[in-house]
Image: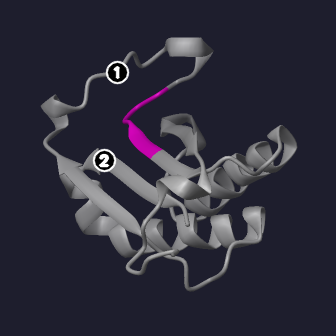
Amino acid sequence: MPLVQIDLERSLAERLGPQISDGVHQALVDGLGMDPTDKFQIFRTHAPEEIVFDPGYNGVDRRQLVSIQILMVHMYDVTTKYAMFDQIAKRLEEIGVRPEDLLISVVENGFEDWYAGKSRS
């Protein structure tokens, strides 16, 4: 059950929020083989001055920053994670979010670290 947290400028969320949500979710379904009903996302919107970044870091022409942090169980290999990153970038580019403006990170933990509305006992 990945938990996706997306930080972005408020104006971008207002313009493309539902499409970003759908694109990220579909990329996880396709890239990780995730159950389509497993959708948990938190959007955190910001004024432009609240998002600080280097526009040229790593040789990239970055114009804005869309940060996507995915908290998930440690169970995917590196190749699968890279494919997921590529799927997210592709799907968001289709709706007008430049891949150069994305910062995607994965934070992993174990199955025992999750409670999703019912006990495992």
Q: Residue at x 72, y 53 (%)?
A: 84
In terms of depth relative to the viewer, which is nearer, 77 or 86? Answer: 77
Q: For residue 53, which numbered disc appears in the image?
A: 1
Q: Residue 43's quadrant in the figure?
A: bottom left
| Percent x, y of residue 35 | 66, 80
Q: Amino acid at mark 2?
A: Leu
Identify the secondary structure beneath mark 1.
Answer: loop
| Percent x, y of residue 42 | 32, 61
Inspect the magenta stretch and tell me whether residue 104 lies in it: no
Q: Cβ–Cβ below 8 Å for labels 2 and 1?
A: no
| Percent x, y of residue 115 | 42, 67
- Disc 2 to disc 1, C-alpha distance: 12 Å
Dot 2 crowding, Cα within 10 Å, few <14, some 14–19, many 20+: many
Q: Which residues are magenta?
A: 62-68
In terms of depth relative to the viewer, which is nearer, 120 or 100? Answer: 120
Residue 110, above or below 106: below
Dot 1 crowding, Cα within 10 Å, few <14, some 14–19, many 20+: few
Q: For residue 108, which numbered disc appears in the image?
A: none
Left or right placement of residue 22 versus residue 55 in this view: right
Which sits earlier in the primary sequence, circle 2 or circle 1?
A: 2
Q: Would you name the residue on which mark 2 appears?
A: 8
Quarter of the N terminus within the rendering: bottom right
Q: Residue at x 86, y 43 (%)?
A: 79
Residue situated furthest bottom in the rendering: 37
Q: Amino acid at mark 1?
A: Phe
Q: Residue at x 48, y 37 (%)?
A: 101
